[in-house]
Image (cartoon, grey):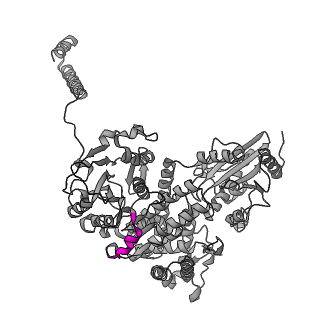
Amino acid sequence: MVRFQDERDVDRYVEGKLTSIGLKLKKDFNDQRNMSDYLKASLKGSSKTESKAGTGVPDFTVEKYGVPVIIENKVGLKKLQKLTKDGISKNDRDVQDFAVNGAVSYARHMIHSGRYDSVIAVGIAGDTSDDLTVTVNYVFGYEGEPKLMTDYTALDFLENHSAFNTFIADATLTEEEKHEILIKSQEDLHLHANKLNKLMNDHSIGVAERVIYVSGMLLSMQDIIDGNGEMLLEGLAPKVLNGTQTEKHRDGVKILSQIDEYLTNKGVPDNKKKLMLSSFDRISIDSDRDKYTEVSPLVSKNIKGNASITRQVFQYVYDNVFTRITGTAGHLDIIGEMYSIFLKYALGDGKEIGIVLTPPYITKLMAQMLGIDKDSRVLDVATGSAGFLISCMELMTLEVNEKYGKGTTKANNKIEKIKNSQLMGIERDSQMYTLAATNMIMRGDGSAKIEKGSSFDQPEELYKDFNATALLLNPPFTYSENGMPFLAFGLKHMKKGGRAAIIIQDSAGSGKAVKSNKEILLKNRLLASIKMPVDLFLPYAGVQTSIYVIEAGTPHKFKTDIVKFIDFRQDGYKRTKRGINEIDKPKERYADIPIIFNMGLNSDKHPEFHNELWELPEIYVEDTITDSGADWNFEQHKKINAKPQKSDFEKTVGDYLAWEVTQRIKSGFTGNEMAERLKKA
């Protein structure tokens, strides 16, 4: 047994353990003196001292397996980790004093640098070699809690590629875990959007300007990287906005100049850049917002003394929104969520202008039902803030990394192709166009094919060259026929055999969009209709919606083509103006819907299906439709079984006997008299 006197003793012991499982120092693992330049760059600003101004230096790092491993050691079991009610403490002192907290903090900074998608954080602490605890966390985002790997209490998983791959398989998030993270991230983002809205409202920043402020500031925070991955210019940090009053160096002007520089280095075409800068100009146009003023309590923790309004908004966005771009909720439309919150304050719910953006877990669900894969060519002719394209990009990227290996040349080249040429969106509204382009740029620049203008007025060559295999949309429902003409138009420009999914007011399927529906069915086939929860878009709008899934290029045969009707009104959530609450396993239910869509009543044969959650005959119907264009919804096809069952008879008799007994007791009958009457009954 070795008793540890100081941290160097623990370091020597851990180095010995790594060596004993066959790893070699400076080849398979590194100590503080020789970690790679690439990993060192990812830790810039992560120092646990000097107010995080320097580069962090973990005790040991392992880089040989692709996903990096950070190891932090401490003397004494009491120094293993510090937890709060929210999880692993992020307090600066706790990060410095506790092994797990320090390792996780390093991992989060590495992910936030954009150089890594996930990091393994190992905290080790003990008093002796026989009384040592190893805690392993899989860190997959800057925000949120990492995944504690409870089955791994030693370093043996680092012994070889096989052992490490087993660990990664165990660490990889399930669909249910991903869904839970997505919902939690959305809730947190709504919380910060509400606070940010108050901050800007208190400083008289107009509602129409607020989302432009947020998206522009987010762009200015991005590092400018060249084609070789080298940094050309760091993104703006709050401290740069120091309230200088000269015209060319005002805080708002600095932000706009940084955005211009960023878009230029991203290679954004001049016409698009000019259009985006004309929107972002609102950040710099009012010089009064760049003058010193009293600091709001919402940002006083990180701002000492007075600061400009611009700096205060920037600080809040930097601290609470910017970090989420590299987080785990890949399907989360950050700017769209912000827009929805601000719109709620502007118009009550947004129905007046027909803008109700689709929740991220719905964009993901619809993309999954279409079977989006790495070779899909995805079109959205009513793009909004690009939520559907974001979800598709996430699914496509995930498949590429699983097939070719994350970070490999083949994977990187394919992902670049996906972002540059396999995602196309059209948006008419100038502000929404700017938001969509910004969203896609911040996700690695999928903005190449975000087009400005009306979908109906784009040149035919644009659609012909793109040759879409998938179409997803949530059209403005104030448009004629609830927006169904967008679907009819998009289907005309799809490859035969491609699939489309639209979420729309379900009145479009029961009589309000007959003209478009009949036109659609002449050349396309309705595959499925999914009835969605009535509170799905609360608190922004209370509308009844359905998802319709269509196959392009095959005329619908009304007598023989079977349509799948699914009742998903009970999705496991309860939505109120205050937020979204779990009531009955929503993560599992959302994982099951693509299975039901594909397998119908045979879904219970799928190994991952949660059969106990469903009465399949009650929520799933297969039926034909007519050529009326007005019978596309679940309620019109739900079969009501009118034939009495034996169980119905038994229940009726039982109810009668119970009633008879009650009446006799009230009338004072004796037990024998009652038995005789019941016998006759």
The quarter in which the C terminus is drawn is top left
Which residue is located at x 47 percent, y 69 percent?
Answer: 421
In this orientation, does residue 325 appear?
A: no
**Residue visible at 41% across and 37% down in the picture:** 605
The quarter of the image holding the N terminus is top right
Instruction: Please tell me whether residue 384 is drawn above or below residue 593 in the rendered image.
Output: below
Q: Who's the residue at 59% across and 81% down the image?
A: 243
Residue 294 percent coordinates (x, y): 55, 76
Q: Position of residue 188 (x, y in %)?
A: 50, 58
257 horizontally vs 489: left or right: right
Closer-to-camera residue (230/476): 230
Compare residues 666 and 453 and report the one nearer the observer: 453
**Secondary structure that dominates the magenta span:** helix
Give the answer, above or below, for where 9 lies relative to 603: below
Which residues are drawn in magenta? 456-468
- Relative horizontal placement of residue 370, taking residue 245 as reference (left or right): left
Residue 485, image x, y percentages: 27, 66
Q: Quadrant of residue 338?
A: bottom left
Instruction: Give the left or right position of residue 165, taking residue 2 as reference.
Output: left
Residue at the outermost bottom position: 247
Residue 330 to residue 82: above or below: below
x and y, in percent, of residue 251 in the image: 57, 81
**Residue 128 lies in the magenta stretch:** no
**Looking at the image, which is closer to me, 265 or 248?**
265
